[in-house]
Image (tube, grey):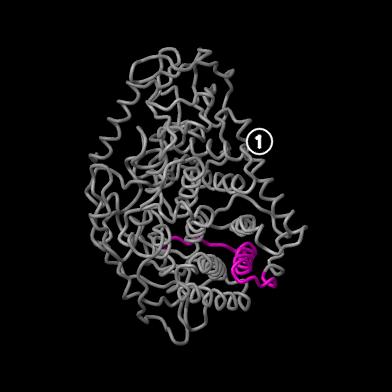
C-alpha cells in the first residue's frame, strides 16, 4: 500500500473521529454578503448555532429545515441557512453534539487562491516543457518536474496521411496541455477548456488583466490567463494540416503508457486522423481566441482567424467525416457522429468575430436544442457566446429573444432543481465526469447572472460551487490541495510518477459515478447510492481522474464568483 493511500486512510479516520461528518459545507468559506448554506444529515435536532472559534461564543442561531430525503444519497437532510449572518471572522457550526469544520466568513480575496490554482492547473498540465520550481510551489510542496513529450519528432500516422505528408513523415508540434491523467493531446477535448478560459476573460477582463498566476510568462504583455491559453492555441495551430486545412483529431502514442513521469514516457507519438468535429472545434476555438487576443497581438489574431476560415472551408467540403480509432490505436477516441452542434458553434464564433452575418444565418440556431455542454455537445457554447455579446451584435429582436429565452430557460430550470433539492444543488447527473458537468451548470448560471443580475442565478451558482467544495454526500472538497478533506490519490500519471505524496494541486476530480464499480472492484466503493459512489484511489479512473474539459468550467465558475463577490484589489 502506497504512502499516499495510507495518508488518505489516516486522514479519513481523523475526520470521522473529530468531526461527526453530519455537517457538510463549503470547506473554503463564505463571502459575508452572499448566500451561506450548510447541510446537516440524519440529525434529530431542530436548530443550529454559529460558534466563534476565538472565544467559543454563540454568534448566531436559527432553525434547521424539516428533514427531507435525498434519493441520490439515501440520506435524510436538513438545511442550515445562515445567509443573514454577515459578521466576518472564523467560525464553526454546531448541531447538538456535532460540529463542522472551521471556516472563515470574509469579503476580500476568499476565493482568490482557488481561482488562481484552478487556472494554474493548466500550467502544471503543460507538455513539452519542464515545470520550473520557481512556479511550482504550493504550500510546503514543490511540484517541479522534468520536461516530457517535446513533440518535435511526431510521426504522421497512416490514418492521417496526405499528399505532402505521407505516413511516416516527421513533423514538429510542441506545447499543448495533457488531456487528463494521461499524456495525450486531443483537439476535440480542448474545446470546452479553451472556451471556458476565454469566456472567463471576456466576461471579467478588468479582474483577469491583473490577476497574477505566477507562471513563466507573468511579466510579458499578456494577462496571465491568456498566456496560459496561448500555450494551448499555439499547439492547436499546429494541428491544422497545411496540405488541405483539415485538422488532426489527436496527437498521441498508439496506446497509453504506464503510471510514469512525463520524461520517462518514450513511446512514439503520432498525428492521428482528421475529422469534421475536430476541424469545427478548431474553427470555433480559433475564431474566439482571435477576437480575444486581437487587442494584444494583431498578427497572432490574424493568423488564428485565417486558419479558422481555411479549416471551415474544409469542413464545408467534408461535413460528415467522423473519428474512429484506427486499427492498432487504443488511446482516447472522443468519437462523435453528429457535427451539427460543431457547425453551429463554429459559425457563431466566426460571426461574432468577423461580423459577417452569413455565418449567423448558416448557424440556424433555432433548429437545435440546447443542454449542459460537454465535449460531444457544444452547441450551447455557441449560444453562450451569442448571449454574452448580445448587446453588441446587430441581431433582430426575434433572434435576441430566442437567445435570451433559451439561456435563461436553462438557468431557470437549474434554479428550480436547486430549490427543490434536499441538498440545495442542481446536480442530477452521476456519470463519468459528473463534477465537470456540474461545473458547466454553474458556468451557465454565472453567465446568466452576469447578463441579468438576477440573484437567483448567482445563488444557484454558489450552491454548485459549495457542492464541489464540500457540501456533498461524500464530504470531500473535490479540488485537490484545498479544504480539510480532499482527494489524495489521483488517477494521473504525473501525480503517480513524481514520487511526491501530495497530489498535484488545484484539480477538479471526476466525482461520483454510478458506473464506477468496475475499475477498483465493487467491494471497494463506499456506496451504491449515486451521490456517494466515489473512491479516492488511483485505480478509480472513473471517479478520480482529472480532465481539461472538466477543469475549464470549474475555473470559470470559481473565477466568476470570485470576480462577482470580491471587493479587494487584484493588482499584480
- Left or right, residue 347 beside residue 561: right
The question of residue 340 being in magenta is answered with yes
Please name whichever residue, 273 or 473, is drawn nearer the observer in this view of the structure. 473
Instruction: Tell me where residue 40 appears, x and y as whole percent.
Output: 49, 22
Residue 81 found in image quarter: top right
- Find disc 1 in the rendering and name its residue: 416
Q: Compared to 350, does 42 lie above or below?
A: above
Q: Quadrant of the N terminus?
A: top left
Residue 277 found in image quarter: bottom right
Please name whichever residue, 102 or 254, is drawn nearer the observer in this view of the structure. 102
Task: Give the main secondary structure of the magenta stretch.
Answer: helix
Instruction: Tell me where residue 251 appears, x and y as whole percent.
Output: 40, 68
Please name whichever residue, 449 or 315, is drawn nearer the observer in this view of the structure. 449
Residue drawn at the location 66% of the way across and 40% of the way down: 413
Instruction: Please give the range of residues in magenta.
Output: 330-359
Q: Compared to 77, does 470 lie above or below?
A: below
Label 1 neighbour load within 10 Å: few <14, some 14-19, many 20+: some
Residue drawn at the location 49% of the way across and 67% of the way down: 295
Which residue is situated farthest in the right direction here? 398
Which residue is situated farthest in the bottom direction here? 164
- Left or right, residue 22 beside residue 123: right
The question of residue 191 being in magenta is answered with no
Instruction: Tell me where residue 86 appears, x and y as whole percent.
Output: 49, 26
Q: Compared to 7, does 540 lie above or below?
A: below
Q: Compared to 98, does 337 lie above or below?
A: below
- Left or right, residue 402 beside residue 276: right
Instruction: Tell me where residue 435 appears, x and y as whole percent.
Output: 48, 43
Amino acid at each position: 500500500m502506497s504512502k499516499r493511500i495510507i495518508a488518505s486512510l489516516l486522514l479519513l479516520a481523523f475526520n470521522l473521529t473529530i468531526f461527526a461528518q453530519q455537517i457538510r459545507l463549503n470547506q473554503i468559506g463564505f463571502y459575508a454578503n452572499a448566500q451561506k448554506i450548510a447541510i446537516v444529515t440524519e440529525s434529530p435536532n431542530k436548530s443550529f448555532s454559529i460558534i466563534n472559534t476565538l472565544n467559543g461564543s454563540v454568534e448566531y442561531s436559527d432553525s434547521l429545515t424539516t428533514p427531507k430525503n435525498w434519493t441520490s444519497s439515501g440520506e435524510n437532510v436538513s438545511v442550515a441557512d445562515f445567509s443573514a449572518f454577515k459578521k466576518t471572522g472564523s467560525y464553526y457550526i454546531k448541531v447538538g453534539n456535532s460540529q463542522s469544520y472551521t471556516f472563515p466568513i470574509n469579503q476580500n480575496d476568499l476565493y482568490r487562491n482557488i481561482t488562481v490554482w484552478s487556472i494554474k492547473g493548466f500550467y502544471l498540465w503543460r507538455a513539452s516543457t519542464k515545470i520550473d520550481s520557481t512556479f511550482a510551489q504550493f504550500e510546503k510542496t514543490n511540484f517541479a518536474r522534468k520536461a516530457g513529450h517535446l513533440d518535435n519528432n511526431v510521426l504522421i500516422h497512416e490514418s492521417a496521411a496526405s499528399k505532402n505528408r505521407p505516413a511516416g513523415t516527421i513533423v514538429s508540434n510542441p506545447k499543448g496541455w495533457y488531456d487528463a491523467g494521461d499524456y495525450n493531446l486531443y483537439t476535440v477535448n480542448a474545446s470546452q477548456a479553451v472556451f471556458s478560459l476565454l469566456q472567463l476573460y471576456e466576461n471579467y477582463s478588468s479582474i483577469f488583466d491583473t490577476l497574477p498566476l505566477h507562471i513563466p510568462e507573468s511579466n510579458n504583455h499578456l494577462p496571465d490567463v491568456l498566456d496560459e491559453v496561448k500555450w494551448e492555441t499555439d499547439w492547436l495551430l499546429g494541428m491544422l494540416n497545411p496540405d488541405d486545412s483539415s485538422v488532426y483529431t489527436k496527437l498521441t502514442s498508439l496506446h497509453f503508457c504506464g503510471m510514469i513521469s512525463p520524461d520517462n514516457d518514450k513511446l512514439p507519438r503520432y498525428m492521428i486522423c482528421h475529422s469534421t468535429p475536430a476541424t469545427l472545434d478548431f474553427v470555433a476555438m480559433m475564431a474566439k481566441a482571435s477576437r480575444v487576443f486581437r487587442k494584444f497581438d494583431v498578427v497572432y489574431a490574424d493568423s488564428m482567424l485565417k486558419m479558422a476560415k481555411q479549416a471551415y472551408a474544409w469542413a464545408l467540403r467534408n461535413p460528415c467525416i467522423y473519428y474512429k480509432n484506427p486499427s492498432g490505436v487504443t488511446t482516447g477516441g472522443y468519437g462523435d457522429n453528429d457535427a451539427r452542434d460543431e457547425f453551429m458553434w463554429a459559425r457563431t464564433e466566426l460571426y461574432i468575430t468577423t461580423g459577417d452575418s452569413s455565418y449567423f444565418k448558416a448557424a440556424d440556431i433555432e433548429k437545435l436544442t440546447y443542454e449542459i455542454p460537454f465535449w460531444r455537445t457544444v452547441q450551447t457554447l455557441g449560444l453562450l457566446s451569442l448571449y454574452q455579446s448580445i448587446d453588441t451584435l446587430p441581431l433582430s429582436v426575434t433572434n435576441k429573444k430566442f437567445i435570451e429565452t433559451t439561456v435563461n430557460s436553462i438557468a431557470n430550470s437549474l434554479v428550480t432543481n436547486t430549490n427543490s433539492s434536499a441538498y440545495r444543488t442542481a446536480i442530477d447527473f452521476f456519470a463519468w465526469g459528473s463534477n465537470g458537468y456540474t461545473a458547466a451548470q454553474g458556468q451557465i448560471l454565472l453567465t446568466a447572472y452576469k447578463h441579468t443580475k438576477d440573484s437567483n442565478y448567482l445563488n444557484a451558482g454558489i450552491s454548485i460551487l459549495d457542492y464541489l467544495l464540500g457540501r456533498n454526500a461524500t464530504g470531500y472538497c473535490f479540488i485537490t490541495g484545498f479544504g480539510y478533506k480532499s482527494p489524495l490519490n489521483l488517477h494521473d500519471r504525473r501525480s503517480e510518477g513524481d514520487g511526491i505524496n501530495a497530489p498535484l494541486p488545484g484539480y477538479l476530480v471526476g466525482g461520483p459515478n454510478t458506473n464506477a464499480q468496475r475499475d477498483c472492484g465493487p467491494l471497494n466503493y463506499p456506496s451504491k447510492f449515486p451521490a456517494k459512489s466515489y473512491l479516492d484511489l488511483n485505480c478509480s479512473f472513473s471517479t478520480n481522474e482529472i480532465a481539461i474539459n472538466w477543469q475549464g468550467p470549474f475555473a470559470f465558475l470559481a473565477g466568476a464568483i470570485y470576480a462577482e463577490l470580491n471587493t479587494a484589489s487584484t493588482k499584480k
